[in-house]
Image (tube, helix red, strand yellow):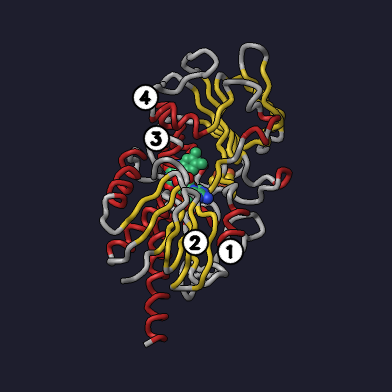
Amino acid sequence: MTKPILIVGGGPAGLAAAHSLATFGQPCVLVEKADRLGGAPILEGYAKLVPSGEWARDAIGGMVERTAGHDLVEVKTGATVTAFSGAVGNFTAALSNGETLDLSAAILCTGFTHFDSANKPEWGFGTYPDVVTTSQVELMISSGQGVRCPSDGRKPQRVAILLCVGSRDRQIGREWCSKICCTVSANLAMEIREELPDCHVYIYYMDIRTFGLYETTYYWRSQEEFKVKYIKARIAEVTSDGEKLIVKGEDTLVKRPITIPFDLVVHAIGMDPNVDNPRLSAVFGVDLEPHGYIGKANSYAATGLTNKTGVFVAGSATGPETIDDSIAQGKAAAMAALEQRQLAARLVS
Ligand SMILES: Cc1cc2nc3c(=O)[nH]c(=O)nc-3n(C[C@H](O)[C@H](O)[C@H](O)COP(=O)(O)OP(=O)(O)OC[C@H]3O[C@@H](n4cnc5c(N)ncnc54)[C@H](O)[C@@H]3O)c2cc1C
Ligand code: SF4
């Protein structure tokens, strides 16, 4: 009987990897540190996903059901891997809950950590209660509460969404584009306008990266159909006059200072490397790439190879990724692990 393959992390990438392996008759053990599966979309309470428009609880909840319900998938929540040793086809892992597992390979699907907006204090987060993050607005919508100002529960009349918070910012050591936040923000802006038709929504941007097919359905639709206003700007600070939040900056198209009052300011937060990555690197013997994500080899031979034979990686553990791409990478890493096993079996026979 083939030893199980270990999958670490039960988000979209890990769920896809586990489901693929199980479908091919390969047993696997899915170890998740949170108390439930689903990754960021479920743990953070995302609302409607881009680009499908489906509620995260239905789309990713469906993945959780299909995967956890499979006979060949053993799920261990509330656990982490504390030690990992051996060689391809013959690894041993120790779990934080005291269990030991014999395994043939491992796939790291440990995802990302949301940027902590407290690292951008000049933009008001942590100082003013009505400065929030995109994750918080997603949760307001998905919980059914609706978009409100946390300070007093009122419906905002003017909302500013500030893009690239914790991304593309050399001053705070984040030299990457988080890929999805322009599209997520355009989507949120439309959802706010739908719920509060009298509310004015402004998006402050450096560049708009609603990449690929998202340009029509998010960037143009948000302006033409939902009247969301886009301002190309460099933001200096977010302050308060005691009544309104004040966003100060420079309109970089006309090169003039702009100061606009708002009720609610939303930080479109980026995707940081998982804070666990140094520990994961030490336990699994995998190298991190220079930004702190888990390093992966090029994909020409197989997808999701790390520097350690028998240990694979998929999804946003490797850098900012969309859900669709994380799922695709999870499946590709599952295939790579099966291919490796097949090659090893041929060498032995
Ligand atoms: C505000 C916001 C909104 C977004 N909305 C969308 C959207 O609408 N559409 C879209 O395509 N993308 C969206 N994204 C991106 C999306 O969150 C990611 O693409 C997706 O979550 C990546 O899936 P993943 O499985 O790689 O990682 P995650 O979803 O991060 O899952 C990783 C899992 O691993 C677990 N884990 C972490 N460390 C360990 C450890 N040491 N041991 C065990 N388990 C561990 C975590 O608890 C988690 O369950 C959004 C991102 C943000 C910030
Ligand atoms: S996707 Fe948009 S908001 Fe996100 S980092 Fe890239 S340019 Fe900035």
- Contact between marks 1 and 4 (CB within 8 A): the answer is no
Disc 3 designates what residue?
47
Residue shown at the point (34%, 54%) measured from the top left? 74
Mark 2, Cα crowd under 10 Å, few <14 / some 14-19 / many 20+, is many
Work out whether mark 3 precedes mark 2 in sequence or the reverse, and give the earlier one. Answer: 3
Q: Which amino acid does label 3 sit on?
A: Ala
**Residue for badge 1:** 286
* Mark pair 1, 2: CA separation: 10 Å
Indicate the position of residue 89 as horizontal and vertical percent values.
43, 73
Between disc 3 and disc 1, the foreground one is 1
* Disc 2 residue type (three-letter): Val
Q: Quarter of the picture for ligand 2?
A: top right
Disc 2 Cβ-to-ligand 1 distance below 8 Å = no
Q: Residue 144 carries which label?
A: 4
Q: What crowding class fits label 1: few (fewer than 14 Cα within 10 Å), some (14-19), or many (20 or more)? A: many
Contact (Cβ within 8 Å) of mark 1 with mark 2: yes
Q: In which quadrant of the rendered image does the C terminus lie?
A: bottom left
Kindly report which numbered mark, 4 or 2, lies closer to the viewer in this rendering: 2
Pair 3/2: label in front: 2
Inter-mark Cα distance, 3 to 2: 27 Å
How many other residues sit within 10 Å of disc 4, few (<14), some (14-19) or many (≥20)? few
Q: Percent from the top left, x then y, of residue 291?
A: 65, 55
Is 214 situated above or below 72?
above
Q: What element carries label 4?
A: loop
Q: Mark 2 points at which residue?
A: 313
